[in-house]
Structures are given as C-alpha cells and as structure tokens.
Image (tube, helix red, strand yellow):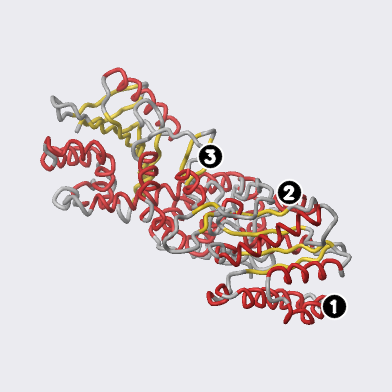
Amino acid sequence: MKKFNITGTCIPKEHYTVDISNKLDQIEKLVEEGSYFTINRPRQYGKTTTMYLLSKKLRREDYLIIRISFEGFDKEIYKDQKLFIEELLLTIIDKLELQSEEELIKIIEENLSRATNMRRLGRLISKIVKNDKRKVVLMIDEVDKSSDNQLFLDFLGILRSKYLSAKEGEDYSFHSVILAGVHDVKNLKIKLRPDQERKYNSPWNIAVNFNVEMSFNPKEIETMLREYKDDKGIEMDIPQIASRIYYYTSGYPYLVSKVAKVIDEDILSDKEKKKWELKDIERAVKKILEEDSVNFESLIKNLENNKELHRLVYRIIIEGNKIMYNSDNPIINLGELYGIFRNESGRVKLHNRIYEQRIYNYLISKVETDADMTSYNFRENFIQEDGYLDLKKVLRKFQLFIKEQYSDKDQEFLERNGRLIFLAFLKPIINGKGFDFKEVQISQEKRLDVIITYLDKKYVIELKIWRGEKYHQEGLEQLSDYLDIQGLDKGYLVSFNFNQAKEYKEELIRKDGKEIFAVWV
C-alpha cells in the first residue's frame, strides 16, 4: 500500500509522488548538452529523489549512468589520497555490479592498485570512458559530506582539467557530471587549517548554473493528490486543496508531503471520513508546528548559530522591514541556502508560512521566558459561556498587563518587542483549542495581522505602531478590506503608542460596515 513519504528517496511504486517530469526534462537537457553542474538546494528539498528519477530516465542505450553518494565515506579516508581514490573506485564498482557492467568492472579492478594519485585516477577515467561507446554520466549525491576537504577539491580539479581537455579533443572524460548538495560547490568556501580564514577556493568554475525550480507549484501538487484520491477513493476539491497546501508551504517538497501525510494518517484516522477539507489543512499545519522534527531543528539551529541571519529574519517578520533581494549579500545568500529566504519580486521573503510560524513560535517562547504573565493570561478568564473566546477581555487584560508591567524605562524594549509580547500573552489562552497565524502586511505602518481560529470561529487582530491619525485611518481601511477577504464583519486592533503622553484607551469603531474594537497600549 502506498503512503506519503518524508524521509529518504521517494519511490513512485511505494509512495505518492509529485509528477516532476517537467523538471527532469530540463535537467536532462543539461545532461544532453554535456554540462557539469550542481543541484544545490536546502535539506529535504528532493535532491536525492531527483537524482534517482533522473538516473532512471537516462538509463537507455546511449547512456551509462554511475550514481554514487559520499554520505557513507569514512572521515579517515579523507586523510590519505590513495585511500580516498580506492574508496571512490570501489563505490563505483559496487554500482556497476548492479548494472552487470562486467567489462568496465574488469578495467577498474585491473588498474585499482595503480591508481594511487589523482593523475593516475584521471588516466583510469579516460580508459573507462574511451572503452565505452555510451555517454558516461557521473552523479554524486551528498557532496557536502566532502566539500570542506582538499582531496575532494583535488578530485574536482582532475574533473575540471579533463573536461577542458576533452572539449579540445585531447582527452576523454565523463560526458556530464552532476553533484548534489546544499552548497553550490562552484562557490565553495573551504577552510584548510583551523587557523585559516575561510576563502573561496573551488575548481568547479566549469559548472553551469542550475536554474531549475525545484519547489512544487500548485499544478504539480495536484498530480500527487490526484493519484492519492484515485487510489484511496477520497473525495476532495483537488485544485482548492493543492492551492491551500501551496499557500502554507510555498511548494517546499518536504512540507508538501508532510501536510498530506498528517491529513492521511492522523486527521483521517477515522475510517468513516472520506473527504479532505480546507480545515483539515489548517489542522495539519497546527499539528506540524507543535511537533519536533529534524527539519525544524535545523531551521532554528541555523538562526541560533548566526546572529546576523537571526537579526535579518527578525527585521523582516517582526519589524516588517522591506529588504531588497541581492544574492551577493552573504547573509541573504546564507538564508536562501538554508531554505529560510526566497526572492519574491525582488524582495527578501520568508520561504514559506510554516517556517514563518515556527520562527514566530521560537521568538515568542524566548520573550515568554523573560516576562511573567501568568497572573494575567489565565485562559478560563477569557472563555464565554458558549465556549468561545471573549477577545475584548483578552485585549483589555493585555492593555492592563503592559500598563502595570512596563514602565517608561522599558519603552525601548517594548517598542522592539511589543508585538512579540502580545503573541506570547495570547499563546496560553488559545493553546489546545485554537490556532494563531501571523501575516506581516508591508505597508506604511508595517502591520502584523494575527488570524486566530478558535473552535470553529475566526478572529482577526491587527497589531501596529501608532504613527498618527492619518496613518490610523489608512490602517482602518486596510483592516476593513482584510476582514472582507476573510469573510468577517468584526475585527480587533492593538495600537502600540510610544509617545510619552500616550493614553491607555479603547474604542469601538465602525468602518465600512465593519465593527472594530481597538485598544491603545
């Protein structure tokens, strides 16, 4: 029985998979042109699956595909040139045995003991290619395991030298070489000794740029859902569901499969339920955000380990700063490398809404540990008799909390963290029964809209910094429009006023047929 897969290679016979034939066609064209390139994308972005499917697609009469991985190479191997070359050749032999390539295996084994340095390895590669009439393609996965090593660079140097000579008709080399890893080896920074600064030092400058879009678009997500629907007899509006999954994931392959897997295996655990609904996606996202995973651990670790990246992320999602995209900026480039950023119409954006929410939760937790709110945000105080949330009470209590706990000397901290403090205040109130979703609206006021789903009701709260009556009225217009989009006639507004003569007040505002309850803190 097929299932959704989130670990390792996706095998079409075993797993529900997205049809990536269009991507494979683009990569195949690069191979046919004889290009050397790196498939560099963040972790769990489908690189290994793509290499697997590409190798199957290319296995025809005019191609010989040698697909290996550096993942299992022992660290000791990189300390000695002869050991490295021997391990590389033995790995190639193992793969050729699976394809019954006895003649090539014999050539390698006869020359194995003589391939003691890179030059002799190069001669053996020439012999392998010369003795085979097919186009020999070398595919190496998990090159990050070896990229910070001089022997690996020496190996790339041999490939580069042979590539150039072969183009001039003076040598034989692989028709195409494909490396797969997080880093683009063409721009590799290597540190050869502990006391050395990392420097750009890669002989892989013969490689062409890899510009194939690896994320899944809604139409591609539909192909996986259609296969699942037909197999399981599940009812769903496929275009609508695919569009909503894309809305939360931006097509990040791991997250697309994870959302689908949670709905199938957890939310549809009741065998009587045979229909996917939009609310199931929100339930799946909520569950994913509450779970630990290697993917999220890596996301937070990358922020914790890089203060400049952490600060840039904070500026974008909390302060609402508009940052122009520039791939030459090392911090932006690093964020994109880790799958945190993407380029959207020339601006730096968080890659997907799930990552954005997880980062919010991480930042909220750090603020929560610095502020004692327990005497203010006890959930039972804010639940109505019908079980729904009394959001007016919540906002009034938050206003009191700020008034009593943050004096004038805390204004700078409050201005920087005010919206995070509100989200931390809100978290235990809706915990278990609700789901809060944050979305920055880049405007003059850099609004942060919080959409709360509590039981089956939806609430929209706008958080903004007070910048005067003119911007306030413009903000009300925007909130009214946003309520229309959400299909609501009531909204809530929290204005952070950092003027010394500020007034803690509340107001019920009527705007374009909408009722907006506003508080100033």
Dot 2: element? helix
Q: Position of residue 268 (x, y in %)?
A: 51, 61
- The amino acid type of the residue labelled 1 equals Glu
Which residue was labeled with disc 2? 26
**Foreground residue, 491 or 445?**
445
Q: CA distance from mark 1 to mark 2?
A: 32 Å
Q: Position of residue 407 (x, y in %)?
A: 11, 38
Which residue was labeled with disc 3? 343
Would you say 324 lies left or right of 25 here? left
- The amino acid type of the residue labelled 2 equals Gln
Q: Identify the residue at image location x=69%, y=76%.
A: 116
**Foreground residue, 124 or 239?**
124
> With respect to residue 393, does 369 lie above or below?
below
The numbered mark, 1 or 2, whose residue comes first in the sequence reads 2
Q: CA distance from mark 1 to mark 3?
A: 48 Å
Q: CA distance from mark 2 to mark 3?
A: 21 Å
- The amino acid type of the residue labelled 3 equals Asn
| Quadrant containing the C terminus in the rendered view | top left
Instruction: Estimate how packed mark 3 is, as few (under 14), some (14 to 19) or many (20 or more) residues with alpha carbons within 10 Å.
Output: some
Q: Identify the residue at image location x=36%, y=36%.
A: 449
User: Can you tell which quarter of the image residue 505 is in?
Assistant: top left
Which residue was labeled with disc 1? 103
